[in-house]
Image: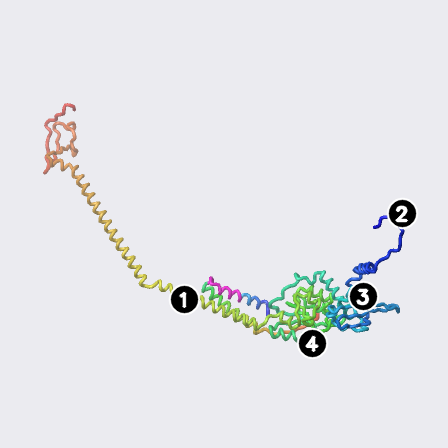
Amino acid sequence: MDQFPAGDLPVPGPAVLGVAEISGIISDALGDERFQDIWVRGEITSYKHHHSGHRYFSLSEQVSGRNFAIKCIMWQSRAQGLVFEPRDGLAVIALGSVQVYEARGDLGFYVQEMLPAGEGEKHLLVEKWKRELAAEGLFAEERKRPLPSFPSKVGVVTARTGAVLQDILNVIGRRFPVEIVLSSTAVQGDLAHLEIARAIRILDARVDVIIVARGGGSFDDLFPFNHPDVVRAIACCSTPVVSAVGHEVDHVLSDLAADRRAPTPSAAAELVVPDKAELAREISGGRDRMSGSLEKKVRAAALLIEDLRLRLQPRRILKRINENREETSELGEDMTQAIRTRIERGRSELARLNALLDGRSPLTILSRGYCIAEKDGRVIRSAANLSAGDRIRLRMTGGGAKARIDEVYHDKEV
Amino acid sequence: MTRKFEEMLAELKEVVKKMEDPDTGLDESIALYERGAALIRECEQKLAEAELKVTEVTEG
């Protein structure tokens, strides 16, 4: 900012910009989101397909008799992705950004994508539905359910006539025949989405799995399978749904809402039923494994029994018996010896007691010259027990005698 | 094909697994073999009986 001396008024002159400056300002202004990544509808005019591969043309529109046009550039790298050949007079929609080519001051619409107008708008509509339905969570991975391994009933939503139903019947009939419940519907046309959605709802909870199928066709032909009515009908199903619309390269929103996408109706049929031949192989494999393991167990048991038999041989038993017998007889001898010893000890004990008894016997005393005096059958132990005139009995070795007491004397102390 | 088939196949797998377990005794193995053989017969019967039947629904 210039400084002006105090008191002087600034002299406002006209602002003069350099070309580079104004180019910069234009560029800046075009950076506004209203000019960036926008879809523009118009008619192609002055179309040039340069040998470099770049495309140069204008998009034009007439409104109230006035002509409007914008120059367009589509670089070769972008033009590679075109799904149609542009030409003058074709109504299209184009995605791109407005930029200025600063070297020449040309304003241009730099095109990234371009589609024929009617179909193109439907594409945009599908993109819009896709965003909205995704925001509702209808395509969420966690909503996906596994298909049943062994369905009893397979529901099919498709046209009653045509190759699609026949293909599905053929594949299921060959792999594993089951009950098929058809819910027929129109599969193209302006109101087909209503019919398809209804046909899906009719089948829900009546079958184990539902195939929603349509054969190949143009984007327009497959369009009903992008419709939110169909997407919601699939997402609301309590029964798992397989979407098989068009060919491998075709993608529709019903694929995103379904639990599984199959590239073709035949592939869907393969997905929903197992292969009978494979099951038969698995079952017979089970039989082989059972027989094998039983044989192994029987062999192992036979070996075990043989081993036990060897260990239980008679000679082993005899040996054991002999061992027992020896032991028994040894014990017997020991016992006899113990008893003999005991008897011997008893005997000597008896002899000792006998000798002891002999020493105390009164008869032994008599043999030494003593005699025992008795009165009235009782031994007289003291002279005090005797009086003159008593009759007593004398016992001595060899016999006895009867006597009468003439006189009794007493020792002094008495 | 029915849920019963699925159950039978699952049981057959279980039987085979048990029979292949070295801790399973011979008596039990023989009983398992009998059960397994019956399951195989039934499964094969089911496979042989399976046939395509097509009906159409129109009412909601």
Q: Secondary structure at mark 4?
A: loop
Measure the alpha-carbon separation of dots 1 and 3.
94 Å
Q: Decide: marks 1, 3 in contact (CB < 8 A)?
A: no
Q: Position of residue A216 (x, y in %)?
A: 70, 73
**Residue extending farthest front:** A5
The residue beneath circle 2 is A8
The residue beneath circle 1 is A302
In primary-sequence order, the first of circles 4 and 1 is 4
Tell me which segment is drawn in magenta: B12-24
Q: Position of residue A311 (x, y in %)?
A: 35, 62
**Res. A57 mark:** none
Q: Is residue A194 visible?
A: no
> Which of A290 and A343 lies nearest the eye of the viewer?
A290
Q: Chain of mark 3?
A: A
Using the rendered view, name the quadrant where residue A175 is placed: bottom right
> Which of A401 and A176 lies nearest the eye of the viewer?
A176
Q: Is residue A44 visible?
A: yes
A71 with respect to A353 (left or right): right
Q: Is residue B23 magenta?
A: yes
Given the image, on which type of amino acid does mark 4 rest? Answer: Gly
